[in-house]
Image: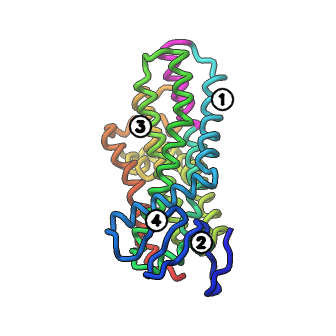
Amino acid sequence: MTAPSREGGTVPDDGGSPRPDGGYETGFGHRIGDGSGSARRQLAVVAETEYRLAVRSRWAVALTVVFAAFALGLTTFSGSEVSPEGFDRVVASLAVLAVYLVPLVALAFGYDAVVGREESGWLNALFALPVPRATVVLGSYLGRAVVLAASVVVGFGLAGWFLVREHGLAGFETYVGFLLAVVGLALSFLAIAVALSAVASEKTHALGGALLVWAWFVLVHDLLALGLIAAFSPSETAVTALLLSNPTGVFRALVLGSLGAAGDAGFAAVLTEAGLSTGALAVALCLWIAVPVALAALLIRRRTL
């Protein structure tokens, strides 16, 4: 909630207030923009404030519960045999679940990172201070990224604990690799959501864009790619380009590579034929994180408040 300020604006929803020295004190006891801190300190303050706001609004609990409920439900009722092969099949099933669930949750969590803070008044207060706009965007992303990554690790980690109880430690390294890939997938779509939020003029526009992004990357892209491959038999380079143009494709290639492409079909089966190493795929997923955040930092400079 926000309240009117003396200047006719709104008081940011972090409970902070302007300071006589020209700075701004957040509701968590930090000062920013008073000229006393370095760029790194300013980034840390913004990230910590964003993190605490997410925790205070129960986002951390909600995300963890969603991931744990779906992952444990699929693991419990998968009916796989007690063996390393059964372990791998459960991981393959969880990967299919993650492709649909994780991007949707990450986009829902991040679509209002910029435009939502602008409507609450918090962004206006920060942008009035001598704090680089790129620092505000990067700090907002980092704060939310910590919450999202922790929720993924705890939620899907509970399913991993259940698998260890059922199948033992044989093959558990496969699950660790899967868990790291899920974190990368979540952070990449969070970065895309922040970029959308930086360019959207209203929260409803950002939400609509997030839903379109989810539909394109999760539903439409693979269907079109599979159709192109079946119709034109493109070269290995073209198939690689199709893979790298979709973060969910990179994620599935990482997971399927560790499983030997077991338990999946369609375009996902083509991914393992692209010939990309695990390191190259990991770098591609990191780029899907870094590029949208950098784009958001550039777009925010042109934003008129």
- Left or right of 81? Residue 254 is left
Determine if the magenta segment contains residue 245. no
Q: Residues within 10 Å of mark 2 (few under 14, many from 20)?
A: many
Q: Secondary structure at mark 1?
A: helix
The quarter holding residue 133 reads bottom left
Between marks 2 and 1 in the image, the one whose residue lies nearer the viewer: 2
Between marks 2 and 1, how big is the CA–CA gap? Answer: 39 Å
- Residue position marked by numbered label 3 in the rendering: 254
Q: Where is mark 4, residue-wise?
A: 30
> Are the residues at dot 1 and dot 3 in contact (C-beta closer than 8 Å)?
no
Residue ID for mark 1? 73
| Alpha carbons under labels 3 and 2: distance apart | 41 Å
Image x and y of residue 199, in percent: 52, 72
Q: Nearer the viewer, mark 1 or mark 3?
A: 1
Circles 4 and 3 in contact, beta carbons < 8 Å: no
- Residues at badges 2 and 4 in contact (C-beta under 8 Å)? no
Quadrant housing the N terminus: bottom right
| Secondary element at image label 3 | helix
Q: Position of residue 57 (x, y in %)?
A: 63, 55
Tell me the kind of residue under disc 1.
Gly
Q: Is residue 213 visible?
A: yes
